[in-house]
Amino acid sequence: MKISVASFLTTISFAALCMGAGSIFTYKPTPVKFLSPKGWPAPAYNFNENPLTKEGIALGKKLFYDPVLSSDNSVSCATCHEPSAAFATYDHPLSHGVNNLTTRNAPSLFNVAWQKEFMYDGRANSLETQALLPMHSSDEMDTNIPDLLKQLNTSPSYKKMFTAAFGPSKITLDQITRALSQFQLTLVSANSKYDQVMRGEASFMLPEKLGYEIFEKKCVSCHTPPLFSNYNYENTAITRDPHLKDNGRARFTGNSADSLKFKVPSLRNVALSFPYGHDGRFYSLLDVLMHYRTSGQIPLSNFEIGQLTAFLNTLTDSSTLSNPAFLPAQAFINNKTPNHTHQ
């Protein structure tokens, strides 16, 4: 069964609001029902505080792909969260910001509705805060907030979209982050081969089946299905980079016990989101699995590594990755659907 968040409820009409002399605008956003995949836990996100609407999602998508959010109009959210990499940073270790490189490799944005904290160190306690932090970071978007608001408020197209989503008023930073959240909340990945096998619609090949059995014995405590993360913070024996000097969660909490602890990433679509690690130091899945073996974290034979890799490839959700609702229009105009594979 294909999971969708595009099931619309009955349109709710709000009171007519005056937009100027002799002009009446009826604010009528179209509610969208968020559907959790069958058998999944309840989402952590409070949809009562930011209800999904067709207009809010469309606005959030436009903002997500628009470099207007950055100080020099060169970087959008999608610059670091690339659709072809399952909305993570693809191919290069560190994400790129307005002043060249940032200090981390951006994680995937799929299934954010089930997360309570964001960023590798958990310093964002809401999805809206997660959108704000890159805007305020000098090595990410370095957004000039007053200039951005002035530009959006004088843009006829944006003014129309914000009015449709939030009603006639001045465009605010709160509206920007709420719209971005609405779009990101629709990025639900739950239709990989693994999901189809769990639903009885497909079967694992032998290497995938053996890999799944190894995964359940050695990996499942941290990468817990169906989200394939427990979203805790773990020290997996990754040494501190001498140049980045990233102490992980301790940089945020100030607690030495959190030193070199990073949020456990989801393994969904992991074959497409290389390189791996908070600083992208592992270029391949083999590199990651070898790290776990050589550091003593998980005992793995060569055979087990091969079977695990076969299973991890079943977590790729091709139908969701190619969903036009998630991609910019030009991706389909130019026939640039996600097609890179992990080597």
Image (cartoon, helix red, strand yellow):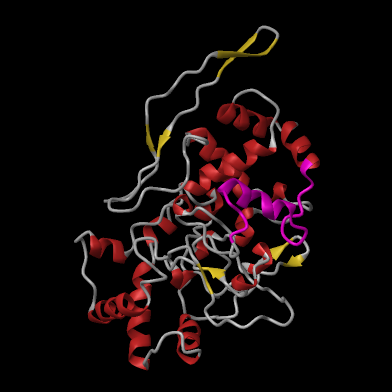
Q: Position of residue 105 (x, y in %)?
A: 61, 69
Residue located 66% across and 53% down the image: 76
Q: Position of residue 295 (x, y in %)?
A: 51, 89
Q: Is residue 317 left or right of residue 103?
A: left
Q: Is residue 180 above or below residue 95?
A: above
Q: Position of residue 291 (x, y in %)?
A: 50, 86
Q: Is residue 175 left or right of residue 294?
A: right
Q: Is residue 34 above or below residue 91?
A: above
Question: 309 or 45: nearer the eye?
Answer: 45
Inspect the magenta stretch and tell me whether residue 125 lies in it: yes
Residue farthest to the left, as pictured? 200
Q: Which residue range is magenta in the image?
A: 122-145
Residue located 78% across and 63% down the image: 99
Question: Is residue 65 among what the camera can see?
Answer: no
Question: 335 or 176: nearer the eye?
Answer: 176
Residue located 44% across and 22% down the image: 12
Question: Is residue 252 among what the camera can see?
Answer: yes
Question: 254 or 105: nearer the eye?
Answer: 254
* The quarter of the displayed image where residue 153 is located: top right
Inspect the magenta stretch and tell me whether residue 57 lies in it: no
Residue located 61% across and 52% down the image: 130
Q: Is residue 283 left or right of residue 74?
A: left
* The quarter of the displayed image where residue 81 is located: bottom right
Q: Is residue 238 above or below residue 131?
A: below
Q: Is residue 180 left or right of residue 4?
A: right
Q: Position of residue 1 (x, y in %)?
A: 26, 51
Count how many numbered circles sit on residues in the image: 0
